[in-house]
Amino acid sequence: MSDLKGKTLFITGASRGIGKAIAIRAAKDGANIVVAAKTAEPHPKLSGTIYTAAEEIEAAGGKALPIVLDIRDDAKIADAVKQTEKAFGGIDIVINNASAIMLTGTLSTPMKRYDLMHHVNTRGTFATTQACLPLLLKASNPHVLNISPPLSMKPKWFGNHVAYTMAKYGMSMCVLGHAEEFKGKVAFNALWPRTPIATAAVEMLGGDNMVKHSRTVEIMSDAAHAVLIRPATECTGNFFIDDDVLREGGMTDFTQYSVDPSVEPMLDFFVD
C-alpha cells in the first residue's frame, strides 16, 4: 500500500499538535479522519478546536468528522465509534495520541492529577482500542499506532516523574500485549520522537528554549505515515523512533524538521 487514500483514521487528541499533523498528512492522500478530542470551544492558551482541525483536514484533501470526545467516558467512545461507522463504513486505523502529562515527583503529584494521567493515557488508550477493534478486525490492513515510548526499566526514567512514566508506559504495554493477542489480524505499534516536538505542551513544559531545540510535528506525521502504509501482518509489536523510521526509507538529512536548524535538537524523554 503506497498511500492512505480512502482509509478511515480514528485519531484521539487530533485537534492540535502531533495528532492533527498525522491527520493532515493522511488527508493529503484522501483519507477520512475522525477528529476525536475534547476541544469544541477555543482554549484561552491553546490554539485549535476539533472544528478548525476538520477545516484544515478537508483543505488538505481529506474528509473530516469532528467528534467531541473525552476518552475517559466509555459510553462516549462507543458512540463515537458508531458515528464513525455510520459516516465512513468502518475504521482502518486508530491513533492513540491523546495524553495527559505532569512531570512531578511523588510528593508534588496530586492524586487528582495522577488519576487524570492514568485514566487518559493508559485506560483511555485501552478503552479506545477495545471499542474500535470490532471494526478494525473487518478492515483490510488494520493498524493501531500509540504515541508512546519504547519500554525501559532504567530507573532514570522513573525517578523524577514516576506517575507520568507509569501512565505513559501503560500505553506502550498495550502495544506489547495487543500485538501478541492480535498477531496476524491487526498491527499494533508505538511511535515516539527522538527529540522534543514543537507543540503547545512542549512550550508549556520548557518554554522558548526547549521549542528552539525541538523538531516540528511533521517528522512525526511523516514517520507515522511510513508505518501505516506497511502490511499489518508484517509490521507489529514495534517501538519505533521517528527518525529511525524515516532513515529506513532512505532519509539522511533531518534539518528540514528542525525548528532552528542552527542548533542541535535535544533528546526527548525516554530516549537514550
Image (cartoon, helix red, strand yellow):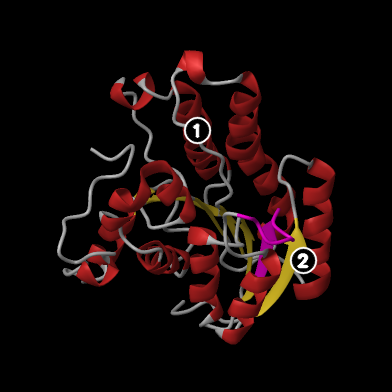
Left or right: residue 228 compared with residue 9: left
Q: Amino acid at mark 2?
A: Thr
- Residue at x 42%, y 25% (from the top left corner): 161
To which quarter of the image does residue 216 belong?
A: bottom left
Above-or-below relation of 75 to 63: above
What SS does tag 1 mark?
Answer: loop
Residue 198: x and y in percent read: 38, 58
Q: Nearer the viewer, residue 25 or 115?
A: 115
Part of the protein shown in magenta? 33-44
**Residue 192 within the magenta-colored segment of the rendering:** no
Q: Nearer the viewer, residue 236 or 49?
A: 49
Distance between mark 1 and mark 2 Cα atoms: 32 Å
Residue 128: x and y in percent read: 68, 47
Residue extending furthest toward the front: 44
Above-or-below relation of 117 to 66: above
Q: Nearer the viewer, mark 1 or mark 2?
A: 1
Q: Which mark is residue 118?
A: none
Residue extending furthest toward the top: 107
Q: Which residue is mark 2?
A: 84
- Residue at x 23%, y 48% (from the top left corner): 266
Q: Which mark is residue 102?
A: 1
Above-or-below relation of 201 to 136: above
What SS does tag 2 mark?
Answer: helix
Is residue 243 visible in the rendered image? The answer is yes
Q: Amino acid at mark 1?
A: Met
